[in-house]
Amino acid sequence: MVDISVKNVNKFFVIGENLLEDLSFDIQEGERVAILGRNGCGKTTLFKILTGEMDYDGGEVYVNPNKKLGLISQIPHFPAGYTVEDVLRSAFTELTSAKRKMEALEQAMTQGATAEQLREYDALVNRFQSGGGYEMDVDVDKICNGLGITAAQRPQEFDSLSGGEKTRINLARLLLEKTDILLLDEPTNHLDLNSVEWLESYIKSFKGTVLIISHDRYFIDQVAQRVIEITDGHAEFYTGNYSFYMEEKQARFDLQLKQYEQEQAKLKQLGYTVERMKGWGINNRTLYRRAMSIQHRMERIQKTKRPKTEKTMKASFGEKDFSGDVVFKMKNVSKSYGDRVLFSDVNLNVEGGERIALLGDNGTGKSTFLKCLLGEEDCGGRIQFGPTVKWGYLPQIIRFDHPERSLYDTMLYEKNLTPQMARDRLGAFLFQGEDVFKTVGTLSGGEQSRLRLCMLMDEKINLLILDEPTNHLDIASREWVEAAIEEFEGVLLFVSHDRYFIEKFAERIWLLENGAIRDFPCGYQKYRSILDHEAQARTLPKSEPKVKKERPRTGTKDGEKLVRRLEREIEKQEGLISELDGKIEAAAADYQELTRLLGEKEQAEEVLLELMEQWEQAQS
């Protein structure tokens, strides 16, 4: 059964320039389809057409009228004073209405019920039950836990949240509505890794139809069964996930280029033959007619178009020579806001050539950590850079000192370039023609990132620090940034939720969690396997490997050493349990975190008992 059908749809904003041109495709019931294409190719416009928010200029659009369709794109407006909980509960408008009617009927029937009231009540109960009314609270908690919406956040006013937090809440509301057709426009943009992984598993188990616009290649690889790429207003189809799409797209390009080159060679040869035969046919009508016949045949040949190679930005990071071993050292570094500790007692050394990913959930303090490192935020402890280190920094939230200036003037004044150099640099980053006269303040998030990178790459640096460098960039731009970073031989430290990017570059991982940084001297895949192993170990029911019992060797000195060592370990374990008690008290409102901490405490107490037994044996 077809859930969505688009036939020969046209949409233009400027007369004569079609954004979508004869766009056609069908989406079958239950399919998970990724919609790909460069920024500005019309993906979001297509979603607005499917929801009826925007009209189109030709063609036909069919959306199954018996299915409920939901879009996560723009954040809807809610009444003033609406809390996060109110927004989430707005997903159950029909069920809430049915519940109110049930309660009113229950009140009315206390003095005796009519047959009509009983029939109406039964119908309401059936509607409430079949719609999942009795599972509303469970569903809300499940979605909130999965997307990292804490119990402390739910009473907050929706209008007080950041744009990213609002997007996350709106995604939760859409999932709670239990729509039959999901349209997701960049759903992973403001989610941390744990939330993205939870959303992946949710979509895989979702029984309905899903259309996804996303530049997150790892995410598409996990959830998409089919890819539709919008190019020059038309649709190209790929039956597979992102990895298949990449291989197939390259194979099609190579085949089309080969066909084009073969045709051009054949046409060139025929053209040469025609010209010679025309020359010979001046005095020979038969040869001349044959020449004209070949020429007409050449005109009727259906010619293959030369495949387009996408414009790419051509630039690389300037590099400064680095001498010495240590790039920077951090000793007992800590940062807190009032009673809230972001991180404490951080001790890290970074040497030349390392590539480090700083990971952690949203709100743990990753961006603050980078700002502390660069001196933009005060912190406790000591940070020392090597004498020849020069860093370049791309922040997550990009601001320009003069947003009223054009791109061209920004490069002239802030980078002290000549007019031609400014044009050349901007051109290398695909700012061409009249685009260079746009004001910086009117640029999109992706364009601002591109401009900041353009300015950054001009500098001679040996330490590159990036905070969410691929946010707001389309896939082609992400690949370009990756190509530039691959050539950079200095130290790379970056924050990212883009697993494709992390897997490609991270050779060392810092995990900011529970106020501390864990250092993993490995890549992303091994890091994930370590965390998975730890998670499995926490869920095992008391069948953890026992602490190996040590018996004192012959001789009094050995026994005394063992007793002292065990006493130190017992003291350390008691301190750990005490620390866990504090964390358990603080996480009382977070069911998921509370469960994890209680599991850790149970393991820690088992280890303490083992140590006490060993201490008693050593004493005897």
Image (cartoon, grey):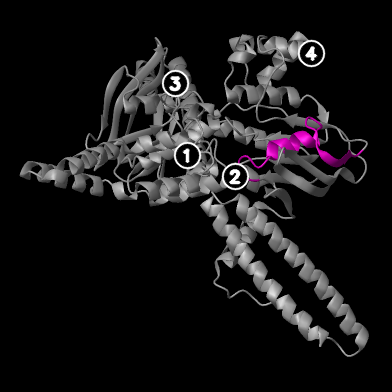
> Which residue lies under the disc numbered 2?
500
Asked if the magenta segment contains residue 44, the reply would be: no
Mark in front: 3 vs 1: 1
Q: Is residue 273 left or right of residue 136?
A: right
> Residue 241: x and y, percent?
46, 46
Residues rendered magenta in the picture: 360-386
> Residue 263: x and y, percent?
46, 31
> Which residue lies under the disc numbered 4?
417
593 relative to 111, above or below: below
Q: Residue at x 65, y 9 (%)?
A: 404
Mark in front: 3 vs 4: 4
Mark 1 or 2, nearer chain start = 1
- Report, in whole angstroms, how far the alpha carbon at label 3 lies from the one at label 1: 32 Å
Q: Residue at x 54, y 32 (%)?
A: 164
Classify residue 611 by image quadrant.
bottom right
**Residue 67 in sight here:** no
547 relative to 322, above or below: below
Q: Quadrant of the N terminus?
A: top left
> Residue 344: x and y, percent?
77, 47
